[in-house]
Image (tube, helix red, strand yellow):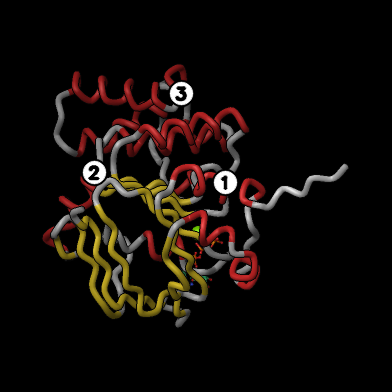
């Protein structure tokens, strides 16, 4: 397996002095699906934002697809590493859904026809093909989330990073997203509190708390460990609990 992300001794302190990440060491390999879990404030979103250089470590190094996170590599890295933010409003800023989904491919210099084709394909994947002309800011939260995902699919990235992708999706939309992600053949990193999704999709899970990696391993083994989960503000997902048979 080829490593596509390598993080060494990463530390990040926000300008107000909050230490969000401390001595993070992590390798992610091609075509892996890695879940990132931990309580509120653990540092999940902060860590993800380092993977395409939105945040830069105060110590340590991050390498993506063999490239150091440095100014000269950023454009290339952002083409290959797509992040769907926790807040859809951070992702959607153009007047219409079409423009938002077209933004990435337009910046990559594709022809109008090619951009149109990519937008249609990406919106179809998230079942939002009828919303092209709608104003992104008038969409419901779940619809915004689907369009946010389309804005990165249209770039055809190599690494897909999703921060809390199922929040505010209804059960059908959540199920469709899970099935879609299962079939999507690329490196995926998924952060969040939807632990059932992690069990279904991820081959590895990383538990973060107070900015540090607590454990890194098989999702079923980690998520089934009740004392570990409870110590870090989480709980064993229903699907992994021992069934009690009562008569
Ligand atoms: N812009 C910021 N300025 C200062 N501190 C911040 C900023 N963003 C996040 N933090 C702090 O950094 C820590 C990690 O936050 P982060 O958003 O990465 O957590 P998280 O694991 O994603 O939590 P959640 O599950 O709530 O999304 C928290 O203590 C948070 O208060
Ligand atoms: Mg977060």
Q: Residue at x 29, y 78 (%)?
A: 9
Residue 190 lies, with reference to residue 55, above or below; the image says above
For label 2, being within 8 Å of ligand 2 is answered: no
- Left or right: 39, with 3 as reference point: right
Q: Residue at x 28, y 63 (%)?
A: 27
Side of 148 where 158 appears, left or right: left
* Mark 1 element type: helix
Q: Which mark is residue 158?
A: 2
7 w.r.t. 3: above or below: below
Disc nearer the start of the sequence (1/3) = 3
**Mark 2 or 1, which is nearer the eye?**
1
Q: Earlier in the sequence, mark 2 or mark 3?
A: 3
Q: Quadrant of residue 227?
A: bottom right
Residue visible at 28% across and 41% down?
186
Q: Which mark is residue 128?
A: 3
| Tag 2–tag 3 contact (CB < 8 Å) | no
């Amino acid at each position: 397996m080829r490593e596509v992300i390598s993080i060494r001794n990463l530390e990040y302190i926000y300008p107000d002095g909050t230490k969000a990440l401390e001595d993070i060491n992590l390798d992610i390999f091609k075509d892996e699906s890695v879940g990132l879990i931990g309580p509120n404030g653990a540092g999940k979103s902060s860590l993800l934002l380092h993977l395409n250089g939105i945040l830069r470590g105060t110590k340590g190094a991050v390498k993506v697809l063999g490239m150091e996170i440095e100014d000269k590599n950023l454009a290339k890295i952002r083409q290959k590493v797509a992040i769907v933010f926790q807040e859809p409003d951070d992702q959607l800023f153009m007047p219409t859904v079409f423009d938002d989904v077209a933004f990435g491919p337009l910046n990559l210099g594709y022809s109008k026809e090619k951009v149109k084709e990519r937008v249609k394909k990406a919106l179809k994947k998230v079942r939002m093909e009828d919303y092209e002309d709608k104003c992104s800011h008038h969409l419901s939260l779940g619809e915004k989330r689907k369009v946010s995902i389309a804005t990165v699919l249209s770039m055809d990235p190599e690494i897909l990073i999703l921060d809390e992708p199922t929040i505010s999706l209804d059960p059908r939309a959540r199920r469709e997203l899970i099935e879609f992600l299962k079939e999507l053949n690329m490196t995926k990193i998924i952060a969040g509190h939807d632990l059932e999704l992690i069990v279904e999709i991820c081959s590895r899970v990383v538990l973060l708390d107070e900015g540090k990696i607590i454990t890194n391993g098989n999702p079923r083994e980690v998520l089934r460990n009740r004392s570990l989960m409870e110590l870090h503000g989480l709980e064993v997902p229903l699907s992994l609990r021992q069934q009690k048979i009562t008569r």
